[in-house]
């Protein structure tokens, strides 16, 4: 199946925006389904198994966070959150509920299409394959990363990472001690469509630190090189 044949489900109670997006995606060659509330959106997911979901957060009766959780119970379909709330806390909540990406309203339609195509491409490729060695790529008394088993532990307890978080951490660990630029990280983990979205990367780094660091506000693993990028600091 080509990307142009992919089916996109839009779940948004704003009928004006929904119709605008539907027309544009149809012109781009996508099949488009529409739902104007969360319950109808879930029904469409169960019935039609779309290739990607565009999901608004603020909807009556059932908000986008709840819809996202329900979808994740039955499907790994890529989910892009459409949100008028640009606060990091709101975006991270969406990521924690299982969203793969987010776009803050108002957005430009060509940017939305680029994000859709990037997410479809990543879904088709699957997670980045790491080395097959049974030895952890990194391990100390607090953090362990086992590439072959796709297993991450923090203080001896397994930690669940999304494929994007896993790939981001893998990239940092592979290049331990070296500063990776913002553009370098965005292109390698997300694709060229994201290379200028530094704030986007900062949200994911913040989210990853919350899962991995003993003190996320004073990180010791994922360090910021202000104005340049990030580096992973080994604690051996």
Image: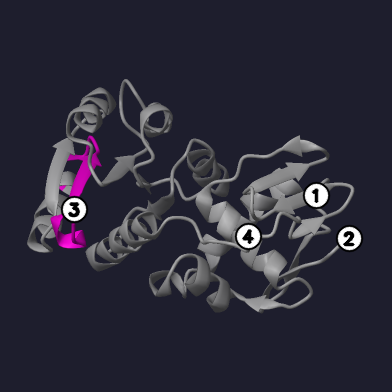
Q: Which residues are magenta?
A: 1-16
Is 30 displayed left or right of 168 in the figure?
left
**What's the image's color scheme?**
one colour
Which residue is label 3 attached to? 6
Which residue is label 4 attached to? 132
Mark 2 secondary-structure assignment: loop
Q: Earlier in the sequence, mark 2 or mark 3?
A: 3
Which residue is label 1 attached to? 143
Which residue is label 2 attached to? 235
Q: Give the CA distance from mark 2 to mark 3.
A: 45 Å
Q: Give the CA distance from mark 1 to mark 3.
A: 39 Å
**Residue 56, position in %: x, y?**
32, 40
Q: Give the CA distance from mark 2 to mark 1.
A: 9 Å
Label 4 or label 3, whichever lies nearer to me, is 4
Q: Residues within 10 Å of mark 2 (few under 14, many from 20)?
A: few
Q: Earlier in the sequence, mark 4 or mark 3?
A: 3
Look at 72% across and 52% down and name the residue there.
145
**Residue 71, position in %: x, y?**
36, 31
Location of residue 147 with respect to 58 vertically, above or below: below
Q: For the C terminus, which image quadrant?
A: bottom right
**Residue 174, position in %: x, y?**
69, 69
Mark 4 secondary-structure assignment: loop
**Is 122 in front, or is 103?**
122
Q: Earlier in the sequence, mark 2 or mark 1?
A: 1
């Amino acid at each position: 199946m080509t990307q142009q044949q992919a089916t996109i489900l839009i779940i948004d109670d704003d009928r004006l925006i929904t119709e605008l997006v539907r027309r544009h995606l149809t012109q781009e060659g996508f099949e488009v389904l529409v739902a104007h509330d969360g319950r109808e959106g879930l029904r469409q997911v169960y019935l039609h198994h779309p290739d990607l979901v565009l999901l608004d957060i603020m909807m009556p009766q059932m908000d986008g966070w709840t819809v996202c959780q329900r979808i994740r119970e039955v499907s790994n379909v890529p989910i892009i959150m459409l949100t008028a709330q640009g606060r990091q806390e709101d975006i991270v909540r969406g990521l924690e509920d299982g969203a793969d990406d987010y776009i803050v309203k108002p957005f430009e339609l060509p940017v939305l299409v680029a994000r859709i195509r990037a997410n479809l491409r990543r879904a088709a490729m699957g997670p980045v394959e790491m080395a097959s060695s049974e030895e952890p790529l990194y391990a100390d008394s607090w953090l362990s990363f086992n590439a072959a088993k796709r297993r991450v532990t923090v203080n001896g307890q397994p930690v669940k990472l999304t494929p994007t978080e896993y790939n981001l951490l893998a990239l940092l660990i592979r290049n331990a001690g070296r500063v990776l630029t913002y553009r370098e990280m965005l292109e390698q983990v997300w694709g060229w469509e994201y290379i200028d979205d530094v704030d986007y990367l900062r949200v994911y780094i913040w989210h990853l630190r919350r899962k991995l660091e003993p003190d996320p506000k004073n990180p010791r693993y994922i360090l910021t090189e202000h104005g340049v990028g990030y580096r992973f600091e080994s604690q051996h």
